[in-house]
Image (cartoon, helix red, strand yellow):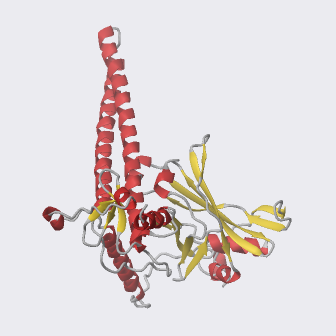
Amino acid sequence: MQFKTILRLALFSLVLSGILPTHLLQGQVIRENEKGEKIIVYEDGSWQYFSDYSSGSDEIFQPTEQQDLQRKYPVFKGQIEPLDGNIDVTQEDLFNIASRRAQLAKEAVLIAQERADKAKQAREQIQEEFLRAQRNGNANKQDIDHLTTRLKAAKNMELETAREALLAQQEAQKAEELTVKGGFVEAFNLKQKRKRNQSNANTRLPSNNAVSFNIPLSDNSQAVSGQRDLLLYPPAPACQMEFEGKDEKTGQWRRDVKQELLFTHTDDRLRPFLKDKEYLKCEGNFTSVGGYRFLALQFTFAYPNAREAYGFIEKGSYLTIKLLNGDFINLKAGKMDRGSYDLTTDLLTYQVHYPIDRSQMGLLKHSEVDAIRVFWSSGFEEYEVFQLDFFINQLSCLENF
């Protein structure tokens, strides 16, 4: 085998194993075409099949004149807007995120189509009951009217779910086109610029422009006498410990605060079809073993095929905690977790521990949390946190209970 071919095979084996990112391959990136075939795209828009490259072939396809006008596989040339929290973002990261969103869009199509199929089956069943009652001749008017009402409602549901399935299909096509044709870097840059401009606008607001309310903030009688207003400053919830005793693995003293809900999240593409059900739920707690402290997070997906979209959490991958005071804290996963699927509950769960030092704990104890950014193997995703005092309460319980 020629040395050139051996070098190519070695290089791409490192890329596919995750040791080397594809954006380091001399200005070229790996994409998938509309058939799902891996291709290598060069800066000038030319491309080559991945299998041809790895076998040593020099056959490269040049873009046609029509493709020059609307490149099908563009390589972004320019600077990617920085991500707050001092985390570098590559074009490959953004491609992975676009691919994940395309996968979630496909998932929405499957859910929507399943709902549409069930609605059609329900309509057909009611329609058969209605026709049978008409043929029978013994059904009274009240029964016929009741079946007519049910059939009308079933037809409306069938039309609505069919419309939802069509819209889901259209959204999936748009997401797939964004992944295949490119444009995801420009979309990310635009979003980051808008966020930065909004942040700058908020900081420029004069401090004396406070909003005044004519209604009293509290009717607590204790506030009048100068004591703490319990409505404005409610007491912290009572501490609950999950475990306190000797750790079986290490033999050291261990303390676990009771697990609490940190956030829930459902992708916009899935929200219309999941209704009140959440796609992702994250619960967490702090634990101490010996002189070490850990943040333990449990990510639970309501659909097991979420693994196709999100992949796994790699050892050393970042968890960025955004605080309301503007600070950022970056933690690193202590081990890899590929997720475990429960056949009984149909839930996919990831269990991840993030070591944390005392300086980071000090920051978390004095500011409420705004958002959590998790770095999956398919790229990062940011989640809004509603339990703003999660870290304050958890750490207080860990240290003082």
Residue 346 appears anywhere in the view: yes
The quadrant holding residue 298 is bottom right
Viewer-proximal residue, 130 or 166? 166
Q: Quadrant of the N terminus?
A: bottom left
Viewer-proximal residue, 42 or 270? 42
Viewer-proximal residue, 256 or 218? 256
Viewer-proximal residue, 72 or 260? 72
Residue at 62% across / 40% down in the picture? 344
Number of numbered tags placed on the structure image: 0
Instruction: Tell me if 45 is positioned left or right of 295 in this view.
Output: left
- Asked if 362 appears above or below 380 in the picture, the reply is below
- Asked if 137 appears above or below 75 in the picture, the reply is above
Q: Quadrant of the C terminus?
A: bottom right
Question: Where's residue 357, x and y in %?
Answer: 69, 79
Residue at 28% across / 45% down in the picture? 166
The quadrant holding residue 96 is bottom left
Residue at 38% across / 58% down in the picture? 55
Instruction: Tell me if 12 is positioned left or right of 363 in this view.
Output: left
Residue at 20% across / 64% down in the picture? 63
Question: Where's residue 83, x and y in %?
Answer: 44, 78
Q: Residue furthest left?
A: 65
Residue 235 appears anywhere in the view: no
Question: Where's residue 84, x and y in %?
Answer: 46, 80
- Asked if 126 appears above or below 174 in the picture, the reply is above
Question: Where's residue 42, x and y in %?
Answer: 30, 69
